[in-house]
Image (spheres, rainbow, N blue to C red):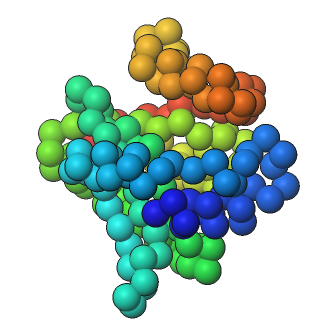
Amino acid sequence: MPAIERAAAAAAFAAEPSIDPAHTRSEADYARLIRKGHSLVAHVGEALAGFLVAEPFRRELHIWEMDVEPAHQGQGIGAGLVRAAQIDARNTGFKALTLTTFRDLPWNGPFYERLGFEEVTALDAHLRLSGELANEVDDGLPADRRCAMICFLD
């Protein structure tokens, strides 16, 4: 998973100086998230082509990372992973999926909007997401380009 995350970031963010594609989650981080029971993978043949890792927070399932191997991007694998996460979340009683992303990049904010997500504009009412955005800014991501998004599952 870290290798796919690095490759996807290098391909997607080549022209983004604020993103370091070498900065990825560790194998231990992925193992911890997988143990939470809401992570998904996509294979093309025998090869891992993409993944989505998520973690429960009360009545919401938060997507921490979703990546597709560059050779398989643009084939619907990412959208399929998000739709599968929506089904998983709904079937296990979650009320919403959440995530943080770049609002202005076509394969980030607009991609998730097409899948039913909307930007959380009242962050004072959603302290967990507000805190996550603050952590991202502390890690060097540009505050004016980041947003939290939510997809209600009702």
Look at the picture and state if 118 lies above or below 8: above
Q: Which residue is outermost to the bottom?
A: 45
Q: Residue at x 63, y 48 (%)?
A: 23
* Residue 142 location, quadrant: top right
Q: How many marks?
A: 0
In which quadrant of the rendered view does residue 85 lie?
bottom left
Indicate the position of residue 60 as horizontal and vertical percent values.
29, 32
Task: Determine if residue 97 is in view.
Answer: no
Q: Residue furthest top?
A: 124
Picture layout, residue 96 above or below residue 66: above
Quadrant containing the C terminus is top left
Q: Would you say residue 124 is visible in this rendering?
A: yes
Residue 121 percent location from the top left of the image:
56, 21
Q: Residue at x 63, y 67 (%)?
A: 7
Counting from the top left corner in percent of width and height, residue 130 is at 52, 18
User: 144 or 96, which is in the foreground?
Assistant: 144
Q: Residue at x 84, y 46 (%)?
A: 17
* Residue at image point 57% right, 50% down: 24
In this picture, residue 42 sits left or right of residue 147: left
Q: Can you say whether 30 is above or below 80 in the image?
A: above
- Name above or below for residue 113 compared with residue 78: above
- Between residues 34 and 129, which one lies in front from this camera angle? 34
Residue 18 falls left or right of residue 34:
right
